[in-house]
Image: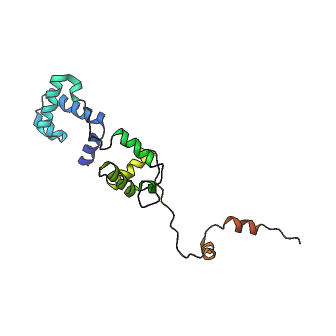
């Protein structure tokens, strides 16, 4: 239960701010940093840091700063070029398949830009560029169309039309 509550506190920027605010308030009311840390489930050193930030910067010292994250491996121009390439066939680029998928896009980016991206990252690129992943329907070799029609849940258009014929009585 405690872990679930702590995860919820860490989930949003506002809840983390409120948590820090409560810690500083408890210290301001006379509790020690180790006591507050034990009570709220934080390291005493962390509580000391929050108190110091509050003393130096006021309430703004308790707000989360922007975290830059990892720098993208593809530049804006490369991103645009990939979007244009996806509007063409992979065969146009010497790739041995007829349809774009994560594996094909990964191979294209590796050969074109010498950047290795995983298949899952390439699948995310499709969505970021506004494309949907489509899987081709498998075609069974030597399939008998008449036997396939027997197994269909809904009759074909021709079969429906044939059932509606009205004879003269």
Q: Residue furthest right?
A: 169
Residue 167 percent across, percent down from the top left? 85, 70
Q: Give the side of residue 138 with respect to residue 12, left or right.
A: right
Q: Is residue 150 above or below residue 56?
A: below
Q: Is residue 144 above or below residue 80?
A: below
- Residue in front for this viewpoint, 22 or 161: 161
- Residue in front for this viewpoint, 51 or 26: 51
Quarter of the rendering containing residue 142: bottom right
Q: Quadrant of the C terminus?
A: bottom right
Q: Is residue 68 visible?
A: yes
- Residue in front for this viewpoint, 8 or 36: 8
Q: Is residue 29 visible?
A: no
Q: Residue at 36%, 38% (x, y): give it.
A: 76
Q: How is the image coloured?
A: rainbow
Q: Is residue 14 above or below residue 160?
A: above
So how many labels did they put on this image? 0
Quarter of the rendering containing residue 32: top left
Quarter of the rendering containing residue 15: top left
Residue 68 percent across, percent down from the top left? 26, 36
Residue 107 percent across, percent down from the top left? 35, 56
Q: Is residue 130 above or below residue 17?
A: below
Residue 45 percent across, percent down from the top left? 11, 36
Q: Give the side of residue 62 with respect to residue 141, left or right.
A: left
- Residue in front for this viewpoint, 108 or 64: 108
């Amino acid at each position: 239960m405690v872990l679930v509550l702590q995860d919820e506190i860490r989930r949003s920027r506002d809840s983390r701010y409120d948590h820090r605010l409560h810690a500083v308030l408890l210290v301001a009311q006379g509790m020690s940093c180790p006591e507050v840390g034990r009570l709220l489930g934080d390291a005493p050193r962390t509580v000391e840091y929050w108190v110091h930030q509050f003393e130096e910067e006021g309430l703004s010292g308790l707000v989360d700063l922007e975290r830059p994250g990892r720098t993208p491996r593809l530049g804006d121009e490369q991103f645009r070029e990939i979007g244009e390439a996806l509007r063409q066939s992979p065969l146009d680029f010497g790739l041995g398949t007829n349809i774009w998928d994560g594996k094909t896009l990964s191979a294209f980016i590796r050969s074109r830009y010498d950047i290795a991206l995983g298949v899952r990252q390439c699948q995310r690129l499709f969505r970021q560029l506004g494309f949907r992943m489509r899987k081709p329907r498998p075609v069974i070799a030597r399939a008998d169309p008449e036997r396939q029609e027997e197994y269909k849940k809904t009759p074909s258009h021709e079969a429906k039309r044939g059932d509606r014929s009205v004879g003269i009585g």
